[in-house]
Amino acid sequence: GAGVSQTPSNKVTEKGKYVELRCDPISGHTALYWYRQSLGQGPEFLIYFQGTGAADDSGLPNDRFFAVRPEGSVSTLKIQRTERGDSAVYLCASSLDVSNTGELFFGEGSRLTVL
Amino acid sequence: AQSVTQLDSQVPVFEEAPVELRCNYSSSVSVYLFWYVQYPNQGLQLLLKYLSGSTLVKGINGFEAEFNKSQTSFHLRKPSVHISDTAEYFCAVSRGAAGNKLTFGGGTRVLVKP
């Protein structure tokens, strides 16, 4: 498709389980971003990639969260030992490159619910 | 560090009436400013941005925003809203040297009534 694709759109899991969320950016976009949006709040930055490397992971809340982008395209956000507080919508965005200031293209998000 | 405050969490407005959404930011360095819109069941999309130059910025769908450095504000306006403008609007800032790492406000939900 033409836009940023995120799967799954909804994920319900139990506390303590492992979860993977996938993002397929717009073709040709070298920069990829993960944000988290809790209910009633604006998106919060988690991590961004330029190519295959994580250029800034300062927003990851703790070491249970990890993200990869091995081939510079698709990215996976991994959450270990999920907690109820991890429940949120996880947003992925891409841009042509990091100098294309502000032109982020967002996916529809993956809604994670931890019971 | 920078932060963004959207003073109104919800704004009800009648169709064809004007609307203003308020955004204030704090930052110790120069910033770039943005408004994103999220329509129901869709991803966020860029409405407009201020990088430099003219402080009045025009965006898509008839929206405009004015950058006021002395008041550290970037309020969004539309002179006449349509039902289709019902959405959530987010103000965001970034530092140019930080790439496209955006700091978002909490959002303002606009409900346009007929």
Image: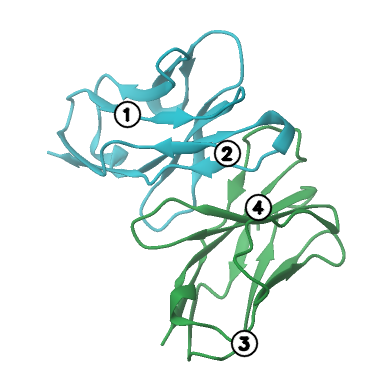
Chain colours: A green, B cyan
User: Quick check: can you spot residue B63?
Assistant: no
The amino acid at mark 1 is Arg
Marks 4 and 1 belong to one chain: no
Mark 1 vs mark 3, CA separation in Å? 40 Å
- In terms of sequence position, does the residue under pointer 1 or pointer 2 come before the other? 2
Dot 3 corresponds to which residue? A18
The amino acid at mark 4 is Ala
Which numbered circle lies on residue B22? 1
Residue A39 % position (x, y): 36, 62
Dot 4 corresponds to which residue? A2
| Closer to us: B63 or B9 | B9
Mark 2 vs mark 3, CA separation in Å? 32 Å
Closer to the eye: label 2 or 4 = 2
Pointer 4 with pointer 1, Cβ within 8 A: no
Near mark 2 (Cα within 10 A), the count class, few <14, some 14-19 or many ≥20, is few
Count of marks placed on residues: 4
Seen as rendered, the residue at the extreme top is B54
For numbered disc 2, what is the local secondary structure? loop
The answer to whether A17 is drawn above or below residue A48 in the figure is: below
At a point 41% along the width and 20% down the height, the residue shown is B65
Pointer 4 with pointer 3, Cβ within 8 A: no
Closer to the eye: label 1 or 2 = 2
Marks 1 and 3 belong to one chain: no
Which numbered circle lies on residue B1? 2
Give the position of the N terminus of chain B as an image quadrant: top right
Mark 4 vs mark 1, CA separation in Å? 33 Å
The amino acid at mark 3 is Tyr
The amino acid at mark 2 is Ala
- In terms of sequence position, does the residue under pointer 4 or pointer 3 come before the other? 4
For numbered disc 1, what is the local secondary structure? loop
